[in-house]
Image (cartoon, rainbow, N blue to C red):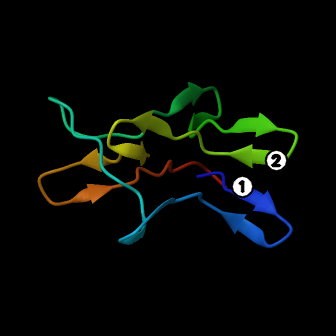
Amino acid sequence: IPLNNTPKGPYIPLNNTPKGLYIPLNNTPKGSYIPLNNTLKGPYMPLNNTAKGSYIPLKNTHKGLYIPLNKTPKSSYMPLNNTPK
């Protein structure tokens, strides 16, 4: 998963709330997910490129900002792409 590279190091932006930092889950009829772009080199998480750097776009809802995660019978998870090194 590409991370935002800043002078302080790479990071995934998280939602800052009174309860702490978190990646909220998006619950849909089919489960929860992070949408990935499918390319010839494999799936990847698209980043928004701005003058201040790249970042993971978050969806703004009435419940707050979130990055959806895949929900499986065992747990929720952020999918990773397995590719040849």
Circle 2: element type: strand
- Residue at 67% from the left image edge and 56% from the top image edge: 3
Q: Please state if 28 lies on the left or on the right of 69 as rendered.
A: left
Whole-percent x, y for residue 70 in the image: 30, 46
Q: Return the mark for residue 4.
A: 1
**Amino acid type of disc 2?**
Gly
Vertical arrangement, residue 16 with respect to residue 38, above or below: below
Decide: few, some or many residues near mark 1? Use Cα within 10 Å; few <14, some 14-19, many ≥20: some
Q: Please state if 83 lies on the left or on the right of 4 as rendered.
A: left
Q: Earlier in the sequence, mark 2 or mark 1?
A: 1
Whole-percent x, y for residue 6 in the image: 81, 62
Residue in the foreground of this view, choosing between 79 and 18? 18
Q: Please state if 27 lies on the left or on the right of 43 as rendered.
A: left
Q: Please state if 52 lies on the left or on the right of 69 as rendered.
A: right
- Residue at 52% from the left image edge and 59% from the top image edge: 14
Vertical arrangement, residue 56 with respect to residue 19, above or below: above
Please report contact status of discs 2 and 1: CB closer than 8 Å, yes or no: yes
On the image, numbered disc 2 is attached to which residue? 53
Whole-percent x, y for residue 34 in the image: 41, 40
Circle 1: element type: strand
- Residue at 20% from the left image edge and 60% from the top image edge: 75
- Residue at 30% from the left image edge and 49% from the top image edge: 25
**Amino acid type of disc 1?**
Asn
Whole-percent x, y for residue 23 in the image: 41, 57
Residue in the foreground of this view, choosing between 57 and 62? 62
